[in-house]
Amino acid sequence: MEVFAVQGLPEVRPGDDLAGLIDERADLRPGDVVLVASTVVSKAEDRKADLSAFPAGERARRIASRLETITGDPKDPRFAQAVIEESEELLLEAPFLLAVTRFGHITVNAGIDRSNVPDADLLLLPEDPGASARRLGDRLDVPVIVTDTSGRPFRHGQRGVALGYAGMPASRDWRGERDRDGRELGVTVQSVVDELAGAANLVTGEGGGGTPVAVVRDWSFGDHDGSDELFRDPGKDVVRQALRQWRYTEDSDWSPE
Ligand code: GDP
Ligand code: MN
Ligand code: MN
């Protein structure tokens, strides 16, 4: 397969026809998959916000002051307020904010970005990235994945992940297929939307490079069952349950990476 960045996209503004901007530059073919950084989806959907829109409540002030003590850096309680408002639940309040977003993705600071955002303090994630992917996919007539760069537990560094997708299954379900020795695979469900998002993130970059859209060409899902689960069922997510019970204490050996 081939993965390439779509060149020449402008700074995206609220109300821009993002599908049109992509279509004019991508020369798409049937079978292509389009990956779009959530940053530009948010910009087109007018998800820029100023801190003044988030007057801090009591919980946000408490969180910010504790984070200030832990990190030694100034923390704006209005930022904590924005994270609270974008979240369904905070799994951690310290030593950083780990949030379950309203659409189910778990990430630091509810994915609110402060980089690559001109003329505003903050860029919130799209409200419903799956719906955004469907709208883009309807126009472009190919599968679309809305991505974000996200940290992950257990492993150092960030990578591209899928926040929402349309026009293809989330996963290849290998269960019931056979390994090289003929043994039946019992648990392998391969998150292909995350794997494609990781590949796209390699070519879109993170800094001022300006290539928020990638195309995957000559890749195929293949003859497998598909699954549409992206986020774990909270009732079966033991790591989430463990985090709810964990508390940061001042003698934990933690510092920002
Ligand atoms: P995220 O991973 O979804 O948070 O997106 P990033 O902020 O990492 O942006 C991905 C890439 O798109 C980076 O290379 C940015 O420079 C670029 N980028 C961000 N916003 C825009 C925009 O409005 N227009 C263009 N052309 N590039 C952008
Ligand atoms: Mn982001
Ligand atoms: Mn990124």
Image (spheres, rainbow, N blue to C red):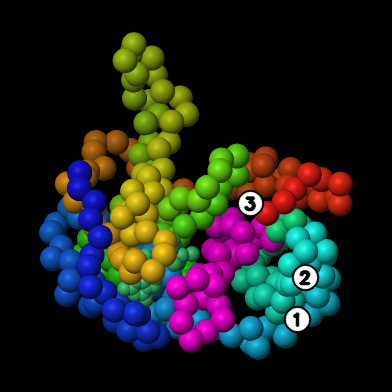
Residue at image point 72% right, 51% down: 255
Check disc 1 and give the amino acid type.
Ala
Does residue 77 appear left or right of residue 224 in this picture?
right
Quarter where residue 32 is shown: bottom left
Check disc 3 and give the amino acid type.
Glu
- Write down the region rendered in magenta: 97-125
Q: Quadrant of the N terminus?
A: top left
Q: Position of residue 64 (x, y in %)?
A: 77, 70
Asked whether disc 1 touches disc 2, contact meaning CB atoms under 8 Å apart, the reply is yes
Quarter where residue 20 is shown: bottom left
Q: Position of residue 148 (x, y in %)?
A: 45, 60
Circle 3 residue: 257
Beta carbon at label 2 within 8 Å of ligand 2: no
Beta carbon at label 3 within 8 Å of ligand 3: no
Q: Position of residue 99 (x, y in %)?
A: 65, 60
Q: Position of residue 94 (x, y in %)?
A: 76, 57
In magenta stretch: residue 17: no
Does residue 166 appear left or right of residue 46 in this picture?
left
Does residue 75 appear left or right of residue 161 in this picture?
right
Circle 1 residue: 56
- Residue 255: tell me if it is visible: yes
Mark 1 and mark 2: Cα distance apart in space = 10 Å
